[in-house]
Each structure stands twice: as structure tokens, then as C-alpha cells.
Amino acid sequence: MENRMTLPVDCDVAAASSLPPRLVAMRQRILDHQPRLLRQAASPDVLSECEHEQLSWMQRSARLTSRMCAAEIPVITPGERICFTRTISNIPPIYAPGELEALTSGYTIHESGPINNICADWGMALSHGLLRRKQTALATRRQKSNDPQALEFLDSTIETIDAVLDLASRYARAAAESGRPELAVMLLQVPANAPRTFHEALQSLRLLHAVAWLSGHYQVCLGRFDQYMYPYLRADIESGRLDLDSALELLAEFFILLNKDSDIYPGVQQGDNGQTLTIGGVTPSGDDACNPLTGLCLRAARDVAMIDPKINLRISAGTDLDLLCLASELTRKGLGFPQYSNDDVVIPALAAHGYAIEDARDYTVAACWEFIIPGKGMEVVNIGAVSFPYAADQAIRQALGKGEDFPSILERTRSNIRQQIDALLKTYSRLFLPPAPYHSLLMSDCLETGRDISQGAKYNNYGIHGAGSANAADALAAVQHFVFNERSISPAALLEALENNFDGAEELRGKLAKDGPKVGCNSPAADDLLVYLFDAFADICESAPPNPKGGLVRPGAGSAMYYIWLTQGYPGMREPIVGATAEGRKSGEPLSANLSPSLGVQASGPFSIFRSFSKINYRRICNGGPITLELSDSVFRTPESIRQAALFVRSFAQLGCQQLQINSLNAATLLAAKANPERHRNLIVRVWGWSGYFCELDLEYQSQVIRRVLYSEFA
């Protein structure tokens, strides 16, 4: 698959356009937190209304959307050409705590409850408009007149449609009263009807997307943005209504606006909000999908330089170098994106897991890195994590304590991985997904069939992260090398050191940490064990029974927040906490993030890291999980270095790796920011599958990022 850009791209970093003054001011207002001053002190009391009317859960979900929309105060900021500013901070409850506990007794509630981290069919939602979606609901209602459950669902979706139309109408009146007739006309057109222009499409998407958040959903991604938005841009360009520079300005404004409300979007840390979009790749028929909007998205993200939207770029071994140069310019900004996904690897893996080939080709990236299908998936891509370090550590301690050999350690490790997976699947054997009437109308077939998305979709798979893989492989390799092959460390000495967290055994710890085989150094001794771990992981997931909706279990290579949680814990945690481990890591120290060498490993260079992780059979590991690299910011300082960075990314794809994220950082800058946060409040870093403002992160995440950079800042 060869991708070819149709938009000329200049690799010269100095050629990067700057934002017009209007957008500079808009961006600064957000960085200065001015939108927060517009927030109302209280949220609407939806619960009392729901209890008074004795509404069902479906009806309560719809009422939440309608009351949140009604409570919003329209804000038209001077200079805005695309509008919506959220004025309500909190999502009010629709059930009292005791009632909610009774209703869900015996079930597992995923994360905070509401459906999240799935992708709407934004292209369909835009091209239909809400009035056509309402007509579809009414038509299905006539067909399902004897199905009370379908009628309740369809009536609930109609209530949410009317609420959004009323919100847009009130914004139109506010625009007219503010002397903005052109904005008022646009808001009367969309999202009620299909957009007529690129500008209207951006405005419609802004409102439709924002209401998903108002409805209590989160990790709301924007899907294959350059695919569903390009027809509007192309029509504008062909008619002469718009040129590429004007389109870039509108797009940059849209990107800036996505940052208006991100401080109130839920996540482990601020910025962990899932506002991702995906560009590039191939069409469902397999043709090159790159178009002029692909390049404009990279340019806009580069010029805006804020944490949202997080850009995912689909590439292949034949991706045009000019496109990769432009992507490297974006990387140079230090935002931690684009994140790259290799179509040559991802599409066959999805097809091997039961996805129709046209759907596999149409994949987008979820909140972090997981692969999902727009409009067709009710997939729960994070039901937890397998702690590879815990599985290996328990096997090492048990086997050495019984005088067993190294193959016994591997078998025990496999058994421990199985136990963790079985526990996760048991927990999720009775998963409760609450109704989502608003989100359902944005999906491909819900209105047409009269079924809420919580009842399932075409794809209903679960995803499990495989965390700490490098640490576990390094620990196993150290035991194999020092205890069994070299016999320079006795089983008793190692067990005593692990039990005492290496207190009084610093020399032994140093030997394990510095002299053992390591993943990331293209060491067969360590890499073979990395492959063993993932093969065992895949074997167990593939043998798991279908979930209640017929879905399978997708193993992944990412760590998410588990690189901290699996060593330090968190409230309500189900996964086991690992202590000191045989690669020389002390108890409480974080694991490596995603696919990256263990912290403190001095890898031979980024290509050796690629070679280590390219050995994983990604056809079986299809829940995503990127190789995570920290490169010195000096790598991106000249046009030629930008080109070399682009060639470096191309080599990642050519070696058959699956995903890649690159942080362009400077260790001295990070240390200065930690010491003097007020001077560096706009410094952005990639944390795990998302980017955030460094100084807003908890200290353990700051420290982990600094350690990654100190040991792997390749120049």
C-alpha cells in the first residue's frame, strides 16, 4: 500500500506558517484559562425530575442530554467563526447512589459507568443532519410499533435530537444578537441539516461532539477526520468558495476550540481525554486515503501546538516521504504526536481477528492507541492489564524456591498470565453498559434497528493491555543468564535480594541492572523471552470463550497508566502489585511505558529498539500498543534532520513494527520545569497514550517521563 500526498509539502522547518492574530489571541485566552470563568456554579437537578416522573434508565439518559443542553448558556466570543463554549462543569447524577448500587448489583460497571472510548460514525451523522436522523427514528418507530423496548429507545433518541436542535437555535439567536448574522445563518443550517461547506461541517461537528461530552460520555474521539471532512473541503475548493490557506485557518480554529473544555473532561490526569483524530491510511476499498486535508491537519496541529486534538497518522512502508517530513515537523514541536500506526501490520491483524476487510481498512485509533471501527464497534478496549512483571516475578520466586529449572519458570509464568486473564474475564462476564440514546444516534445502525448501542454492535470485543513486557523479559533473561547459564548468582542470593528489596545487595542489583541481557539492545536472549511472553498472552486470549455479546479478547502491547499502578496501586485496583524484580528494579519504581526498554537501560540506539520489538507477532497482538521513544530535540533542528527523522519513521514501518510514538524533549528543560513550574506551564509531553501539560501531571508521572528521557535521549 503506497500513500501519495496530493498537497505539496515543504520539509523546511522555517517555512512553518504562523497563526493569524485572531487565532493567536484565541489560543492565549484558553492557555490563560479564561473559558473557565464562564462556567456556571451549579449543574441542573436532573435527578429530582427523573425520580418525580419515575423515568427508566433509558429515559433518564435522554433527559440528562436534554437538560444539559437546555442549561447551557450560549457564548459568542468576539472573533470566533466556530462556536460552542461549555458553561456547565459537572455531569449531574440521574440515580441516587443507593439506587444505582441496587440496579447494578452483581454486575461490573466499566470505569466510571457511561459508555466511552468508542467512535461515532461522524461522516454519517454530518451528511444526514439531525433532522434526517429524526426521520429515520420515526420511520423505525412505525416499523417497531409493537416493540416497547425499541419505542422507548427511539423516543429517547428523538428527545436528544430535539434538545441539540434547540441548543443550536439558541446559539443562532445569540449570534444574531451579537451582530454575527453569518454565524446565525450557519447555526440554523447545522447540525439540523447536512453541511453545505467545510466551515459548516466544522461547526456541526463541534456541536455534535460537544453534546456527547454533555451527555456524560468521555474519551470521545473524532475518528478518520480527513476522510469524512474532505468532501466538504474539496467542494469548497472546486467552487472557489475557499482556498487552502483559508481552510487552514478554519481548521486551526477548530483545533484550538477542542482545548476550551479539556480541563473538565475526565481522565487519570488532565489531558487524558481521548480527543484523538486519525488521518491517512487507506480507504475501505484499499485505495490511498491521503488527501489535501491530511496535510492540513498536520500543519494546523503544528501551528496550534496544544494538547488537543491528539493526531494519529496511519502510514505504511511506502508512505510518501514528504508526508513523513511534515509529520516530523509536528513531532519537533514536542507535543508527543503524531502517533504512527502501520497499516501493513494493523489491517492484517484485525482481519485475522474476524473484522471484515473493508472495516479493518477503515480502522481509527481510540483514546490512546487501540484500534476500533467507526460507527460499528461497542468494544471495551481496556478491561484491565496483565502484569507481565508480576507473572514473571512470582514464577521466579516460586520456581527458585523449589529448586526448579528455567523451563519450569517459563511454564509458571504462562500459568500466572492465564490466572490474571481469567480473573479479568470473570470480572467482566457480567458487564453492565448503561443506555446511551444520544451516542446511539451517531452510530451506524442503531436508529435503523431500534437498538441502543449498549445492546451491542457489529464488533463487541474486549481489550487487555500487556504491561511491563520489557521489565518482565529482562527479569527472565537475567535469571536465565546469571542463575542458570553463568551460575554467577545463586538462587538463594537472588531470592534474598528480592525479598529485601535489594537492601544490602547493591552490587548484585547493579549486576542485574547493568550486565544482563536487555530488551531494546537487539539481544536474542532477552528478545526471545519478550516474544515468549506475548505468544503466551495471545495463546490464552485466543482460547478464551466469547464474552456475553459474542466478542473475543484482543491482547495489546500498551501499558496505559498501569506502568505506575502495577507498582504503586490505586483505589479499587484488581491487578496485582509487583515488588522488586530480577532485572534490578526496586519495589515501587515504575515500569517502562508501552513498548520501551526498562527504565535505566542504555539501549544501543533507536534502531536496536525497533529490531527488538519488531520480533513480536503483531498479527496476534491487535489491541495496539506503541513503541515509545524519547529523542533529543536536537534531532529536529535542520531541514536535513527533519528528513532523517522522516526516514527513521519509515524504517519503523519497513521493519514491520505496529505503532510508534515519539517524544521530542530535553532533559534539562524537564528538570527546570519540575523545579520552576510557573516558567514552563505550557510545556507538553507524551505521557502514555496521550499528551498533557508537564507541570499539571502528578509527580510520579513527571518523574517517570524524566527518567525515560535521561536514559534514552538519542541524538
Image (spheres, rainbow, N blue to C red):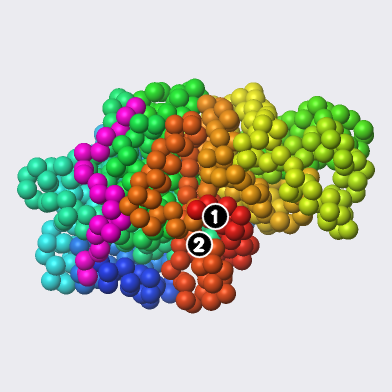
Main secondary structure of the magenta stretch: loop
Mark 2 in CB contact with mark 1 (< 8 angstroms):
yes
- Decide if residue 204 is on the left or right side of residue 707: left
| In-front residue for pair 178/476 | 476
Helix, strand or loop for disc 1: loop
Please tell me the numbered disc located at residue 118.
Answer: none
Q: Amino acid at mark 2?
A: Asn
- Decide if residue 183 is on the left or right side of residue 273: left
The residue where tag 1 is placed is 713
Marks 2/1: CA–CA distance: 8 Å
| Coordinates of residue 262 in the picture (x, y in percent) | 42, 62
Tell me which segment is drawn in magenta: 1-22
Can residue 45 be seen?
no
Q: Amino acid at mark 1?
A: Glu
Quarter-wise, where is residue 420 in the image?
Answer: top right
- Residue appearing at x 32%, y 61% in the figure: 304
Please tell me the numbered disc located at residue 666.
Answer: 2
